[in-house]
Image (cartoon, rainbow, N blue to C red):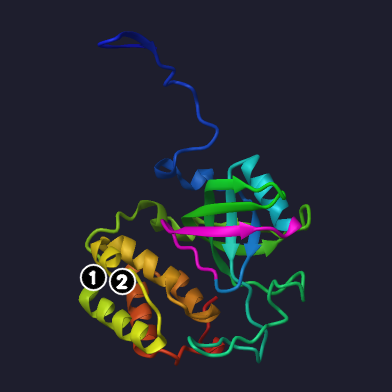
Amino acid sequence: MTRHDNRGSVIIHDDIPRHIPQLGDITLADFPAELGLFPLDEALLLPQGRLPLNVFEPRYVALVEDALASNRLIGMIQPRPLEGMGDTGPGDDTVTDPGMDDGYSDTPPLYGIGCVGRITAMTERVDGTYAITLTGIARFRLLRETALRRGYRVGRIDVSSFVSDLTDSGDDIPFDREGLLNALHDFCEAQGVSTHWEALRQMDDAALLVTLPMICPFGTAPRQMMLEAPTPAARAQILRNLLDGAGHEPDEGASPS
């Protein structure tokens, strides 16, 4: 197709089909039935959120390579703490869970719900490792795991229960914004945590309710509860409860899926 500007004719090929859709054009049909899984403890990716990751373990380097060669999609999901291990609250000493994906076990049990992320930034280092950024697309339900692929875990997934992640605009979320930010302020003071207040105050409601759950230093079960919240307003309420009860997180028995 030919278009003209004040300097003459410019040939623009704007009818070349894309191999993968733009982020805003993704539909349920674009999600594969099987997806490579990246189990990572206390790592929360929400739809519309951005999660930076350093990828150095060989099986996850292979996962990134395979994702880059196809649809650039990866399934972020948390390992489920083993019975009796529980979560540690903010400020508590961290206990290493041998069921986590930390080299003690190759196949720790997983929660039933994760989030599909697309690689939207990538740096390859000279040592063959990667620094990537995943942008959250939609949550998924893990139906079952299939055979390992090049060392990493693969799951059969279903995204249909979370179609709202693709369609909700994030406008008019009914929650107490000022109350949430005040609770965050008290939490940060109590825990000795610093944050960029001006940047948070300038965010719209939808961005705030994605950013805060991802950056607040809560354990595995609370993060999973926020991931599984049915609406952004419900997520805001869970976050508010966690901030108000700093250090008194729900135990694994009240657990999400």
- Of 106 and 195, the residue lying toward us: 195
- Of 147 and 204, the residue lying toward us: 204
Is residue 76 visible to the viewer in this orientation of the structure? yes
Give the residue number, with chain letter if any, for mark 1.
174
Give the residue number, with chain letter if any, for mark 2.
233
Residue 37 on the magenta span? no
Q: Which residue is at the far top?
A: 8
Is residue 229 visible to the viewer in this orientation of the structure? no
Q: Residue 79 falls in which quadrant of the image?
A: bottom right
What amino acid type should be assigned to the residue bearing mark 2?
A: Ala
Q: Residue at x 69, y 57 (%)?
A: 60
Q: Secondary structure at mark 1?
A: loop
56 left or right of 90?
A: right
Residue 48 on the magenta span? yes
- The crowding category of the residue bearing disc 2, from other C-alpha atoms within 10 Å (few below 14, some 14 to 19, many at least 20), is some
221 left or right of 230?
A: right
In this rendering, the answer to whether 15 lies above or below 256 is above
In this rendering, the answer to whether 247 lies above or below 43 is below
Count of numbered marks = 2
Q: Give x and y (percent) for residue 68.
A: 62, 43
What is the quadrant of the N terminus in the image?
Answer: top left
Q: Residue at x 68, y 46 (%)?
A: 65
Q: Residue at x 23, y 70 (%)?
A: 174
Q: Earlier in the sequence, mark 1 or mark 2?
A: 1
What amino acid type should be assigned to the residue bearing mark 1?
A: Pro
Distance from Cα at disc 1 to Cα at disc 2: 6 Å
Q: Residue at x 54, y 69 (%)?
A: 43
Circles 1 and 2: CB distance less than 8 Å? yes
Magenta-highlighted residues: 43-58
